[in-house]
Image (cartoon, rainbow, N blue to C red):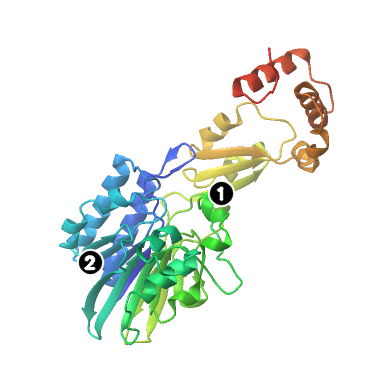
Amino acid sequence: MKFLHLGDLHLGRSLGEFDLYEDQKYILDQVLEFVEREQADAVMIAGDVYDRAIPSESATNLLDYFLSCLAGKNVMAFVISGNHDSDDRLNYGSSLFASNHIYISSQFRGTLYRQTVSDTYGEVNVYLLPFVKASQVRHYFPDEKIETYDDAVKTILKHAELDFGKRNVLVAHQFVAGRGDDPLLGGSESAGTRNVGLVEKIGYDCFDGFDYVALGHIHSSQKVGRDEVRYCGSPLKYSLSEVNGLKSVPLITLGPKGETGIELLKLTPMRDVRHLKGPIGKLLDKAAITSPADFIYATLTDESVIDDAMGIFQQYYPNTVRIDYDNSHTRQIERIDITEITENKSFEELISDFYRKMYSCEISEQELQVMKEAAKEAGVSGETD
């Protein structure tokens, strides 16, 4: 049996002000090409199918397109929800989809979802575990001691009556860590993922005995503990921190029990995400401009602020996402410790001291009045009329 492992599609996502519909369709079409070329039997989608709980019409249409293409090729799909997905919306039509070999588990309801398929070596049990919290699992197993996510997943698996003499595959969307090591974050995960605490972490040894564990939740492709427990990563770069990363799709080949082959198929985006750094004149020199359709993050090293830098940049790179500066002034700001100027000061004193620290001169009365009005509008000034 061959299957492709996807996750963290985040359909409906944008990069800055730029819609990624065409980019996401392009990469899904690439996956469909892999399916046909490799004669894959199934595609696993390990959660965060959508970027938000209420997906846009274009996002739902894109998922419908992808699943319809798989069904048309008689390829199975196994889909779970992630923390970004709405259980109800992702589950809509799941009974009808199942008749076309598209299996969706969007919410844990007390029993680990299982679908058994067959190949030349016999049966393969595919288990689907959508994103769960300890509180959800505690509801179904009140007599179990469940305090952490690790406890929750172990409880689910304990009650699943697994037969590890057979070949078993699990699709899950959780924060899974190795012994003493957290997975390497891609950088575009949600703040909740980046600040995950001990209670949310699950040890990879929870999954001992599974022939392959298809994980979603982390956007960087990597194994966790052993080769067969793996994050596929997001199929596209969704932030500046991912500019140097490579995106791929794991192709999993299940042989007889105990024989699992893993090959990473490289994904090539329609538009890459790049980071350019230097003076604006050099970056926009005709000889230096390459792949102008790419998404660009630019760091300017010019000492003076460039008027309408974004407008100028987008004449050459229309998909410029963000521009910032790295010069002597910004480096000086980074070194300033503002905590020393915040104690026992009025709002006016704080603003004046801060301005003096930043710009080495006094704030004008007009500028101070603007700051007071802005603070009052925001409800943070603490001053009364």
The residue indicated by pointer 1 is 240
Quadrant assignment, res 77:
bottom left
Kindly identify the amino acid type of the residue bearing the numbered disc 1. Answer: Leu
Kindly identify the amino acid type of the residue bearing the numbered disc 2. Answer: Val
The residue lying at 42 percent from left, 70 percent from top is 144
Mark on residue 297?
Answer: none
First in sequence, mark 1 or 2: give its number: 2
| Residue 182 in sight | yes
Which structural element holds mark 1? Answer: helix
Which structural element holds mark 2? Answer: loop
Mark on residue 75?
Answer: 2
Q: Position of residue 134 (x, y in %)?
A: 45, 61
Horizontal arrangement in the rendering, residue 176 relative to residue 349 (left or right): left
Q: Residues within 10 Å of mark 2 (few under 14, many from 20)?
A: many
The residue lying at 37 percent from left, 60 percent from top is 139
| Residue 264 in sight | no
The residue lying at 77 percent from left, 21 percent from top is 348
Q: Position of residue 155 (x, y in %)?
A: 41, 71
Front one among 82 and 189: 82
Horizontal arrangement in the rendering, residue 238 relative to residue 285 (left or right): left
Height in image: 40 above or below 344? Answer: below
Q: Position of residue 113 (x, y in %)?
A: 29, 67
Front one among 153 and 286: 153
Q: Position of residue 246 (x, y in %)?
A: 50, 61
Q: Residues within 10 Å of mark 1 (few under 14, many from 20)?
A: some
